[in-house]
Amino acid sequence: MERHLMKELMTWQATTRRKPIVINGARQVGKTWLLKEFGRRCFDNVAYVNFDNNEAMVALFEGGYDIQRLMLGIQAETGERVVPSRTLLIFDEVQECPKALTSLKYFRENLPELHVAAAGSLLGLTLHSGTGFPVGNVTMLNLYPLTFEEFLDARHEENLRELLVTGDGAVASAFSARAIPLLRDYYYVGGMPSAVLAFMEEGYSAARREQEQILLAYRLDMSKHIDAREVERILAVWDSIPRHLGKENKKFIFGQIREGARARDYRSAITWLSQAGLVTVVQRASKPGMPLSAYVDDAAFKLFVLDTGLLGAMSGLGQKAVVEGSRIFTEFKGSLTEQYVCQQLVAAVGDRPYYWTSANGASEVDFLVQDERGTFPIEVKAEENLRSKSLRAFSERYEGMESLRLSLSGFRVETWLRNIPLYAMANRGLWTTPHAGEG
């Protein structure tokens, strides 16, 4: 399946003054496959080193950063002759060998013509643990589960994807009958590569089995890297997320983790989940000022997991509820739809989302995002019910902003907002292009 990050890797390959590249992301989002496929397509050979349970290679890097010495060990380990400009050197599970991470600085300084790529799944934690992370000496890229657009590519719907991402609003809306069933499939299957592959080969049940295996692997991974008491807190937060998202008010409440739970006991657990790439923390902004980060209310936030398919599996939502009917859009408070939007904003659009509520809590805007063009308030509608009282209240309070509503209804521009189909939200041209296919 094609990953859009491949284009960035190819650009990196052709750059003369490149740094070693580091792919960060949660477990099982496809980092290893992506780098190996990149090597297969673009290099004469690949030298692949996996540091997980690899005592010999860990010992090699513990012995220092002499590049000639390291290269001898790498070639012996991989059985590959490493030739600068022709070989891709991959360090996988690099979080298991902090000295290998540090060595990237020395590869850049002493062998800059060699293409070196590293991948890891807990690098956010490594960066904050005092490890000699080579800040400024590497190019960092984040890999997420497949976006809806990548899911369409995997389903051999490349032409539809191109239409939705680059076409005008009228043409995108004209293909709603084809796009909406695919969107519902994505809500259920999500974007974890093994779940997508299982779905394509064997169907919905196989995808759900893969999701359950991934969730089990995450739990085991938590137990492997942290002490038992902290694991208990992390799992308590993780398991509470579907309950929080199932409410009308999705603000995270520590007291709903368990009776008597206090913020100071669980904030480190949320930090761990965020840095491990398993959750997105969406903070409340008290006003839509520039930059939004300056107006964050640290006490108010929502938590979303990394993948809509995993959220469905955690919640026990069956295929019929999601794919075959509209119950999912009236039950579970539209949680899968907000999860989808959050996921798309982070991975496909490249935004850091916030949200807004009025001081008395009477009005709420689901997401706020900001780019060089300004601030965009976004309301998410799981159904075709287009009443937008909270968004209107926001628009009246903060005039001059382009308000967006994401729904299953077709594209149209009104006097104070524009409605964008959920399946075309990655098309940034629809966010601001005046009168693009109004209807």
Image (cartoon, rainbow, N blue to C red):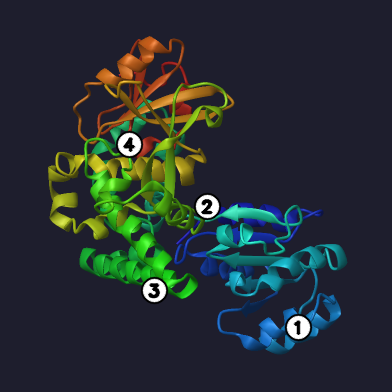
What is the CA distance from the residue labelled 4 to the residue labelled 2? Answer: 20 Å
* Front residue of this view, candidates 281 and 68: 281
- The vertical placement of 237 against 399, above or below, is below
Q: Which mark is residue 81?
A: 1
- The vertical placement of 293 against 109, above or below, is above
C-beta proximity under 8 Å, tags 4 and 2? no
Q: Earlier in the sequence, mark 3 or mark 4?
A: 3
What is the CA distance from the residue labelled 4 to the residue labelled 1? Answer: 49 Å
Pinpoint residue 224: horizontal percent, then vertical percent: 46, 75
SS at circle 3? helix
Query: Is any part of residue 150 visible from this angle?
Result: no
Q: Which mark is residue 220?
A: 3
C-beta proximity under 8 Å, tags 3 and 1? no
What residue is pinned by disc 4?
422
Q: Earlier in the sequence, mark 2 or mark 3?
A: 2
**Residue drawn at (79%, 80%), measured in percent from left and top?**
71
SS at circle 1? loop
Residue flagged by tag 2: what amino acid is it?
His
Residue flagged by tag 4: what amino acid is it?
Leu
Residue flagged by tag 1: what amino acid is it?
Arg
What residue is pinned by disc 2?
4
